[in-house]
Image (tube, rainbow, N blue to C red):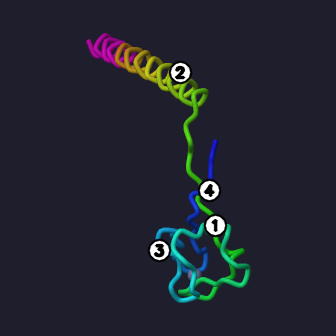
Amino acid sequence: MTVGTGEAECKGCGYTYDPKNGDPDYPVSKGTQFQNLPDDWQCPVCGGQKDIFITKQKEVAGFAENQGYGLGANSMTGEQKSLTIFGSLLFFFVLFILGYFLN
Ligand SMILES: [Zn+2]
């Protein structure tokens, strides 16, 4: 699940609109979410229109997401473990075969 942070980044110049600061030049009062800015608001740095901004999203971890994440992390750890064990076994097996042929 994702929600807008109220921040947005300008594709033109990389300026980030932060609702904590608002835009004193327009002026936009502090606490105004990007999606609530007036349509004729422009990037204070490069003058880009609102529609070239990319709104920032953040993940909100709910119960289901946490569970999935936990399971995912657990199975990944297990895989990595068996991969490491298998990898080292293979490594020693190859060393053994090489040693066998060298002798
Ligand atoms: Zn800009």
Residue carrying label 1: 54
Q: In this figure, which residue is indicated by the disc labeled 3?
A: 21
**Label 2–label 1 contact, CB within 8 A:** no
Q: Quadrant of ligand 1?
A: bottom right
Q: Position of residue 17 (x, y in %)?
A: 54, 73
In-front residue for pair 62/30: 30
The verdict on label 3 being within 8 Å of ligand 1 is no
The answer to the question of whether label 4 and label 1 lie on touching residues, with beta carbons closer than 8 A, is no
Q: What secondary structure is found at the residue carrying circle 4?
A: strand
Q: Can you tell which quarter of the image residue 9 is in?
A: bottom right
Q: CA distance from mark 4 to mark 3?
A: 16 Å
Q: Earlier in the sequence, mark 2 or mark 1?
A: 1
Where is residue 83 drawn, in percent x and y? 44, 20
Q: Identify the residue position indicated by label 4 in the image.
A: 4
Quarter of the image with the C terminus is top left
Q: How far apart are the two marked residues, 3 and 1, measured between alpha carbons? A: 18 Å
